Amino acid sequence: ELKVEQNPLFLSMQEGKNYTIYCNYSTTSDRLYWYRQDPGKSLESLFVLLSNGAVKQEGRLMASLDTKARLSTLHITAAVHDLSATYFCAVGPNAGNNRKLIWGLGTSLAVNP
Amino acid sequence: GAGVSQSPSNKVTEKGKDVELRCDPISGHTALYWYRQSLGQGLEFLIYFQGNSAPDKSGLPSDRFSAERTGGSVSTLTIQRTQQEDSAVYLCASSPRGGTYNSPLHFGNGTRLTVT
């Protein structure tokens, strides 16, 4: 059974600092998604990672995937307040269909001035 | 519309009543999903529709839950005889094709259901 663990679950950081959120999963997968959710808002797709060694960057966020370690990281560089949100990773054990995505509990990020 | 639309945004109901939650997916998206998000929990898969195929109902928690999708577009999730443990945010998502390997899901804002 695929299990997905995110850590930390809560993160409070200062503006300008760097930090990494981790997403571990328990069985073989080469398909991992990162989403962002603002309070009372939709989940917004950030990154789709499909292969070992994949790295994607958007602004101050960079995501990577290591399928051998069953680990994805979401790195935040020089955080700003606008990045405050909850970040979810989701992992799919099978190719071809999203319906069995297993979700982490989310990391609630607060960036303080 | 521009995105996935869900209604109502909030619903408070008494225990034992039935509720209907509505989802309008993005036009042209053939795949539609319902998820449930409880406080402090990840997303729990409920049901999946893809085109005219039989829906995948494997995530529905009990026979009090049902969903339909009319004309391959709008979907309704119905919860009968609601219980307090049904309180959660119900999220709908759509994607262009369920079988597309790397299509992300597009989520609505959700319906927050509170059962008193």
Image (tube, rainbow, N blue to C red):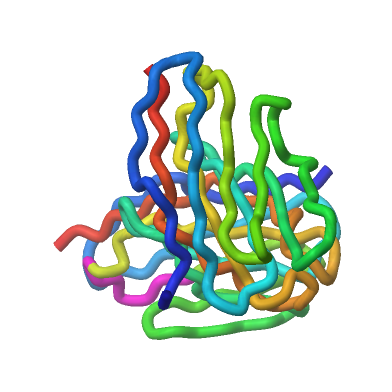
* Quadrant of the snapshot with the N terminus of chain B: bottom left
Q: Is residue B96 above or below residue B92?
A: below
Q: Residue B56: image x %, image y %?
A: 79, 50
B80 displayed left or right of A106: right
Residue A57 in the figure: left or right of residue B102: left
Is residue B19 in sight in this rendering?
yes
User: Is residue A80 located in the magenta-colored stretch of the structure?
Assistant: yes
Give the residue drawn at x 50%, y 62%.
B24
Q: Where's residue A83, x and y in %? A: 31, 67
Q: Is residue A107 above or below residue A54?
A: above
Q: Residue furthest toward the front?
A: B71
Q: Is residue B49 magenta?
A: no
Q: Nearer the viewer, residue B78 or B116?
A: B78
- Residues B96 and A38: in front is B96
Query: x and y percent of residue A1 in the render?
Result: 83, 43
Vertical position of residue A1 compared to residue A37: above or below: above
Q: Could you tell me if residue A104 is visible in this image?
A: no
Q: Which residues are magenta?
A: A75-81
Please report the residue visible at 51 percent of the width from the left and 55 percent of the height from the top: B23
Given residues B30 and A61, the one toward you in this image is B30
Q: How many marks?
A: 0
